[in-house]
Image: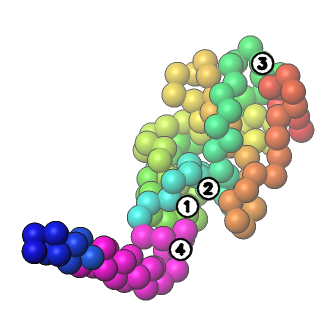
Amino acid sequence: MRKVILILISVIFMLSGCSRAKNDMEKNTGETPTGYDGPIHSEYIFVKGQLYICAYTVIHTDNIQEEIVKLGEVIKQDEYHFPDEEYEATHVPVGTPIYQIGDNIYVSYDGEYYQQYHAATENGMPVEELNSDNKITT
């Protein structure tokens, strides 16, 4: 008798778990930027009318051959919407300096290393890359 009750309880838990998963899928209306509830996972910056995505490539000052131009600082941080205002970002703290080196955008937390951002297409994929020496190509 105990085995039957344990099996019955297990089946009830399994069915309730399946039911919840269906409700979660129905809850996803696609109205958020990513189509899923919750924050955007990648780092984006909106600069000069263009959306940039983090390339997750760090460049040391010694590898930069072009002039480093400070454009401004992050003025707004919002992880739940793609940036669409000048100097707005996801996952980059307010006050972080934004630089332009060549055609790419960078942020630097210490002035010695720069985190690269690529111009993004509509789906958020990068459109430019570094050459094999980690030097900026323009």
Give the position of the N terminus as an image quadrant: bottom left
Q: Nearer the viewer, residue 94 or 127?
A: 127
Would you name the residue on which mark 4 appears? 35
Residue 137 visible somewhere in the drawing: yes
Q: Are marks 1 and 4 in contact (CB under 8 Å)?
A: no
* Magenta residues, start to end: 12-37
Disc nearer the start of the sequence (1/3): 3
The mark closer to the camera, 3 or 4, is 4
- Label 4 environment density (alpha carbons within 10 Å; few <14, some 14–19, many ≥20): few
Would you name the residue on which mark 2 appears? 46
The mark closer to the camera, 1 or 4, is 4
Mark 1 to mark 3 CA distance (whole Å) = 29 Å
Disc nearer the start of the sequence (2/3): 2
Determine the residue positioned at 82% across, 40% down.
129
- Helix or strand or loop: what does disc 3 sit on? helix
Mark 2 to mark 3 CA distance (whole Å) = 25 Å
